[in-house]
Amino acid sequence: DAMVIQNPRYQVTQFGKPVTLSCSQTLNHNVMYWYQQKSSQAPKLLFHYYDKDFNNEADTPDNFQSRRPNTSFCFLDIRSPGLGDAAMYLCATIPGGSGQPQHFGDGTRLSIL
Amino acid sequence: AQSVTQLGSHVSVSEGALVLLRCNYSSSVPPYLFWYVQYPNQGLQLLLKYTSAATLVKGINGFEAEFKKSETSFHLTKPSAHMSDAAEYFCAVSAYSGGGADGLTFGKGTHLIIQP
């Protein structure tokens, strides 16, 4: 089945140690999003790619970066994770165009030691 | 800018009873509205969406929602709750921005508890 796949499902890193989370999709969608969801909170949009065009939300910390080397893959890089960055990170996609429902992966739960 | 308010962080109903989860939105342009369900340690699954067609929208698992512009509401209902409906429910809004990649703004979520 076509889907959005996030690896790993659980990631543990040390305070200040760079970490990369991965998202891949077999839907051939143009748009890929990254959301941060802290415990018992709503998902919050960090940024998205429309094809190769990167769009950062105004309040996304500089500590968070993203790369999209091709249509299928998108990475979330956290350069120096702090304790406050512990969260579930969700990847989502749409073909492109307004009003389309987003297809979500199962998320990566990031813990910071 | 848009926003979503979900009334009630926790809703408890008996199995077989009516489920009503409330969502009010604010948007400066005609909105697109969505309900998603999230089970523990999983991503979000789309239940239904409103995109300016019929105001009564039917979704998966017996859920439906009615868009009421005058009340800026998009409440989610299900006639008869099942134990498997226990989960976190998020109402979300996106608004046309011309870019074709509108992100979602979510409400804070409602945790649905089903009592046997």
Image: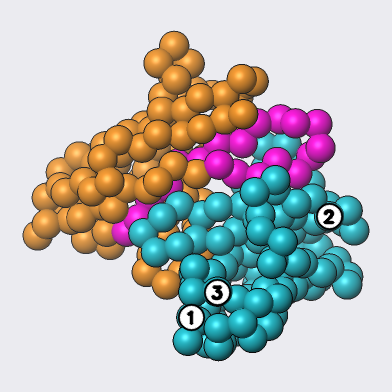
Chain colours: A cyan, B orange
Q: Is residue B51 left or right of residue B85?
A: right
Q: Is residue B15 above or below residue A73?
A: above
Amino acid type of the residue that numbered disc 2 sits on in the rendered structure: Phe
For mark 3, what is the residue? A82
Q: Which mark is residue A111?
A: 1
Q: Is B84 located above or below residue A100 in the figure?
A: below
Give whichever of discs 1 and 3 has the lower sequence position: 3
Residue at 55% x, 83% y is A15
Distance between mark 2 and mark 3 Cα atoms: 24 Å
Of B66 and A73, nearer the camera is: A73
- Indicate which label's residue lies in the foreground, 1 or 3: 3
First to last magenta residue range: B87-105
Q: Amino acid at mark 3?
A: Gly
- Whether the residues at callouts 2 and 3 have beta carbons within 8 Å, the answer is no
**The N terminus of chain A is located in which quarter?**
bottom right
Label 1 sits on a secondary structure element that is: strand
